[in-house]
Amino acid sequence: MIAAQRRNLILDWLRTDGAVSISSLAKRLETSAVTVRRDLDYLDSVGKLTRTHGGAVAGPPLVESPYAEKVVLAIREKEAIGRLAATLVGDGAVIVIGPGTTTEALARNLTAKSGLTVITNSLPVAQAFVESPGNQVIVTGGTLRASILALVGDPTIRTFRGIHADMTFLSGNGLVPDFGLSTPNMTVADADRSMAGASDEVTVLADHTKFGVRTAIQTVASESITHLVTDSRSPRDELDAFSRMGVDVHIAGISSGLLDTV
C-alpha cells in the first residue's frame, strides 16, 4: 500500500473514532509502527490531525492558547506546583524563569526569599517581584509575544547566552517521555532553549493537562530535564517513565503542596 492510501485510511478512521493509536494502526494497515509514526508526523505537519503520545486525535495541531485562557486552567494545581518548586530554591540563588502561568505561580512563591537573582523574559514573572526588594530581577530585551506575555527573539537569546545560572525553570505546551517538553512556536522554542542552556539544572513545571501532548517543536529533551514538578493528577506511567530516565519527579499535593518524590 502506498503512503497516500495509508494516510487517507488513517484520516477516515480518525473521523469515525476520534482518536487512533500507533499499535492499532500498525495492525490494521499491516505495516510497522515506524511507518505509522512517519505517516502521523506527516499528517500532523500538514494540519490534518494532532499527534499525541502513542497516536493521534482528530483535528489540526495545537496552537498557543491566549493568555486569558491559560490563566484560568488548573489554577489550584499550578499554585501547588509553584509552592513545591519554590522549595528547590535557596536564598542567594541565581535562577532563570521562563514564561507561563505555572512559572508565574513559582515566582509568587519565591518573593519571601532573599538575595535571589532572577533572569526572565516573562513580564508577569518580573511583576511578581515588584514588592520583593530583597531580590534582583533582570528582564531580557526582545519582541513582545502577546499570547504568553513574554519577550522573544535575538535580544532574548543573546541575554541568556551570557548567563550562567544555578537553575532554570520552564513550562510549555506539551510533555511526553519520548520527546520531552514542547511548544507549537519556533520563536518561543528558541528562547526556551537558550534559557535551558543558561544553567546547570533544568526544572520543568507541568500540570496534568500537559502530559500526553506533543506539540510541534521540542524545547527540552527528556534526558536534559533535572527535575519535573507536577500535580497528583498526572499519569503515573508517564511519571515512572521520566523517573527511569533519571529525572527527579516531584508531585505536589493540591491541598498542601508538600513534596513527594517518585
Image: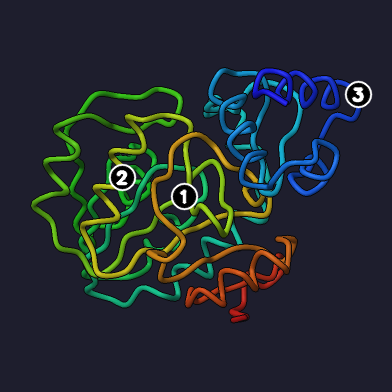
Nearer the observer, 255 or 3 = 3
Image x and y of residue 26, in percent: 77, 43
| Residue most extreme to the right | 16
Is residue 39 found left or right of 98 in the rendered image? right
Identify the amino acid type marked 1: Ser
Report the residue at 39% width, 53% height from top: 220
Question: Circle 1: is it few (<14), some (14-19), or many (20+) Cα within 10 Å?
Answer: many
In the picture of the structure, the residue carrying the numbered disc 2 is: 126
Q: CA distance from mark 3 to mark 2?
A: 47 Å
Nearer the observer, 215 or 145 = 215
Nearest to the eye among marks 3 and 1: give it: 3
Report the residue at 54% width, 41% height from top: 173
Nearer the observer, 184 or 120 = 184
Nearest to the eye among marks 2 and 1: give it: 1
In the picture of the structure, the residue carrying the numbered disc 3 is: 16
Q: Is residue 44 visible?
A: yes
Nearer the observer, 156 or 190 = 190
Where on the picture, by quarter, is residue 77?
bottom right
Q: Are dots 3 and 1 in contact, CB under 8 Å?
A: no
Report the residue at 62% width, 80% height from top: 262
Image x and y of residue 84, in percent: 53, 70
**Could you tell me which secondary element the residue under label 2 belongs to?**
helix
Where on the picture, by quarter, is residue 232?
bottom right
In the picture of the structure, the residue carrying the numbered disc 1 is: 171
Where on the picture, by quarter, is residue 241?
bottom right
Image x and y of residue 61, in percent: 61, 26
